[in-house]
Image (cartoon, grey):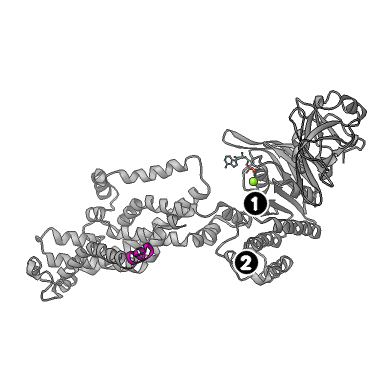
């Protein structure tokens, strides 16, 4: 058998099979969670009902009727959308400045921003709680959650946008200057159209991070601004481990983001591998 | 149309000084070429005129107005970049119209200007394409078109031909010359290629290490280079340099070569073969490059100095044969060996203009 034949067989049969296997391994816990969400709490812990059981919508009905799922969902949407929008606004402005008008300390600023991600969140838990609760009176408000989500995502947003902007030749921006573009015009008419793919993947990633954030959203809210993370957390602690209900809540919480990721996966992959492919 | 004046212009990046006290007057309607080796500061100087680089010291005036702190788009200049710098996401039409759309110009005026420029540059049929779908030469035209539609008072070109192949370069060079003839606008053109400089310029500015070495018309630089650097930079193949001691004393005296001149320069096209008796210098033949129209004859003198002679026909000699050479008195350049400066003040003609 020729080498070409072997490699073709490998790439047409073995590789896809391998890819599917890996995908299955990764997907199984989610699949399991989804299955469990249709079981009663009693069935959920019985191994013999792993795949074969009597499906019920009880958990979902319970969740929407007794646990106010929609309020948490709306809070998640509000905080995530606004935090993403705000992060992008600040991120685009900062990345534009640093990519096209770098100063002597631009590199240091970039490193410093990244270094803030190295601080363990728990280290500032007390000051944050104290400050927001007794001092600023912002505890459990949408504003606070939007602010916190923006701040923790900004370093990554700026870094990503900065790398995408860096790919735009400086001369094109200069041509815009010669043509009489204002700074805003440059961003709107030149930079953003050219970095569109990068902007979309940054936005998507930021959205996912905001949606999934649990440490601060759980600790800085009680009811008014509580997000889906808080709902999951709430269903875990007070009433013991009700796996069916917990699975339903979790499925309903991650569902929107999984669907969003599914639709945008092409964009996401292209954006994240931009530098490597180009 | 406008004149451009540079007064003691300086530029430094941090502690590194790249332009040192440049003084220059560019007259209205003149085609000025900045030429010099790579890294000598040509682009930096051009970009300072464009307003894309801050001016560290000195003044730049355009149309007798100080523009140091004026925004690039308000200086009445348009620039053609080496990389063309077209907007990749816009059609050719929008690339050209983009600058005009930033002004208060009515849209019919924008449209007529873009179409007129496209007509002149033969790019009308590509107006709805994006730059990606164009060849290098076509992109170059669009870049020039984008400059033309703004009807600037000064055109700035930064090595606009360096990304084109040889044939297209010659053709585009001619078109730029025609454009200047037709518009009569002041043009400042940067290149490292002395052929482009010689063919295009009314006035050449030779730069080295951020300083002006000489300013003058192509023929002035060719006939009266101020120093050894300009002498070798202008002209191709470059000027042969000989030591005064290499020359036959009798012939040197007969040709009135300054005995105190350390370096004697003679262009390849001015050396001619002669008899032993009249020889200014003799060298053995090494190699002949025959280009049909003329031949470049490479030789080595007794002391190992390399010489190039441009001859109409290749000599009837084989490698190793001794060839005797001389030149007309008026074509011999003498330089001080320490300073590199020209020794003869001028030859017969007065070079002041
Ligand atoms: N942003 C910069 N920072 C530091 N040095 C620079 C910068 N831009 C240019 N230079 C230096 O200035 C000198 C002139 O550059 P440039 O004008 O581009 O040369 P040319 O166009 O003649 O090849 C070079 O030595 C270059 O290294
Ligand atoms: Mg340059």
Work out whether residue A175 or residue B220 is closer to the camera in this orientation and state it: B220
Instruction: Give the magenta-colored segment's residue range.
Output: A1-10
Q: Which residue is mark 1?
A: B72
Q: Main secondary structure of the magenta part?
A: helix
Q: Chain of mark 2?
A: B
Work out whether residue B199 or residue B94 is closer to the camera in this orientation and state it: B199
**Observer able to see residue A85:** no
Q: Chain of mark 1?
A: B
Is A137 above or below relative to A35?
Answer: above
Whether label 1 touches label 2, CB < 8 Å: no
Question: Magenta includes B183?
Answer: no
* Residue at image coords 66%, 70%: B107
Determine crowd level at label 1: few under 14, some 14-19, many 20+ residues with C-alpha closer than 10 A.
many
Is B181 above or below relative to A99?
Answer: below
Determine crowd level at label 2: few under 14, some 14-19, many 20+ residues with C-alpha closer than 10 A.
many
Relative horizontal placement of residue A15, taking residue B153 as reference (left or right): left
**Observer able to see residue A149:** yes
Q: Are marks 1 and 2 on the same chain?
A: yes
| Earlier sequence position, callout 1 versus callout 2 | 1
* Residue at image coords 47%, 40%: A105
Locate residue A173: give its quadrant.
Answer: bottom right
Locate residue B166: give its quadrant.
Answer: bottom right
Give the number of callouts.
2
Q: Which residue is mark 2?
A: B92
Work out whether residue B259 or residue B156 is closer to the camera in this orientation and state it: B259
Percent position of residue B153, x then y: 74, 55
Percent position of residue B307, x then y: 77, 36
Q: Quadrant of the N terminus of chain A?
A: bottom left
Relative horizontal placement of residue B148, taking residue A182 as reference (left or right): right
* Element under disc 1: helix
Q: State how far apart marks 1 and 2 are (Cα).
A: 22 Å
Question: Magenta includes A8?
Answer: yes
């Amino acid at each position: 058998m020729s080498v070409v034949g072997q490699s073709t067989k490998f790439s047409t049969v073995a590789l896809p099979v391998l890819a599917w296997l890996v995908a299955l391994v990764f997907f199984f816990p989610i699949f399991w969670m989804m299955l469990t969400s249709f079981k009663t709490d009693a069935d959920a812990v019985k191994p013999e009902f792993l795949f074969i059981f009597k499906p019920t919508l009880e958990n979902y009905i319970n969740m929407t009727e007794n646990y106010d799922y929609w309020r948490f969902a709306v809070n998640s949407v509000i905080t995530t959308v606004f935090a993403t929008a705000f992060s992008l606004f600040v991120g685009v402005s900062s990345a534009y400045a640093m990519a096209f008008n770098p100063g002597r300390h631009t590199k240091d600023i970039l490193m410093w921003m990244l270094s803030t991600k190295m601080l363990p969140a728990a280290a500032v838990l007390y000051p944050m709680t104290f400050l927001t609760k007794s001092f600023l009176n912002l505890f459990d408000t949408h504003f606070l959650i939007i602010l916190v989500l923006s701040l923790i995502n900004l370093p990554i947003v700026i870094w990503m946008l900065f790398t995408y902007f860096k790919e735009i030749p400086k001369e094109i921006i200069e041509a815009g200057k010669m043509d009489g573009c204002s700074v805003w015009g440059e961003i709107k008419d030149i930079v953003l159209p050219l970095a569109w793919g990068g902007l979309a993947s940054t936005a998507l990633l930021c959205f996912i991070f905001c949606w999934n954030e649990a440490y601060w959203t759980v600790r800085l809210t009680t009811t008014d601004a509580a997000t889906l993370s808080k709902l999951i957390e709430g269903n875990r602690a007070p009433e013991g481990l009700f796996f069916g209900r917990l699975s339903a809540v979790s499925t309903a919480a991650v569902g929107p983001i999984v669907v969003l990721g599914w639709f945008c996966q092409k964009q996401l992959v292209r954006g994240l591998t931009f530098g490597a492919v180009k | 149309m406008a004149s451009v004046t540079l007064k003691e212009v300086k530029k430094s990046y941090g502690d590194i000084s790249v332009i040192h006290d440049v003084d220059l007057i560019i007259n209205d309607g003149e085609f000025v070429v900045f030429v010099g080796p790579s890294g000598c500061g040509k682009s930096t100087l051009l970009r300072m005129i464009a307003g894309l680089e801050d001016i560290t010291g000195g003044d730049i005036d355009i149309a007798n107005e100080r523009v140091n702190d004026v925004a690039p788009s308000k200086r009445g200049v348009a620039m053609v970049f080496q990389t063309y710098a077209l907007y990749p996401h816009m059609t050719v039409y929008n690339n050209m119209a983009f600058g005009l759309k930033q002004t208060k110009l009515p849209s019919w005026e924008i449209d007529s200007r873009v179409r007129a420029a496209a007509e002149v540059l033969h790019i009308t049929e590509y107006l709805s394409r994006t730059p990606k779908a164009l060849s290098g030469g076509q992109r170059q035209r669009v870049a020039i078109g984008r400059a033309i539609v703004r009807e600037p008072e000064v055109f700035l070109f930064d090595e606009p031909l360096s990304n084109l192949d040889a044939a297209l370069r010659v053709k585009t060079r001619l078109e730029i010359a025609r454009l200047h003839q037709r518009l009569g606008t002041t043009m400042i053109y940067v290149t490292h290629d002395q052929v482009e400089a010689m063919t295009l310029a009314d006035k050449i500015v030779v730069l080295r290490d951020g300083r002006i070495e000489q300013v003058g018309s192509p023929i002035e630089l060719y006939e009266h280079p101020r120093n050894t650097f300009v002498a070798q930079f202008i002209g191709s193949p470059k000027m042969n340099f000989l030591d005064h001691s290499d020359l036959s004393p009798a012939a040197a005296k007969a040709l009135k070569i300054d005995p105190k001149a350390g370096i004697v320069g003679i262009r390849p096209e001015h050396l001619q073969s002669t008899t032993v008796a009249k020889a200014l210098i003799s060298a053995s033949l090494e190699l002949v490059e025959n280009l049909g129209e003329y031949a470049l004859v490479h030789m080595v003198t007794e002391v190992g100095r390399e010489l190039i002679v441009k001859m109409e026909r290749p000599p009837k000699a084989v490698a190793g044969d001794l060839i005797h050479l001389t030149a007309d008195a008026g074509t011999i350049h003498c330089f001080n060996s320490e300073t590199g400066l020209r020794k003869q003040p001028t030859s017969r003609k007065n070079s002041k203009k």
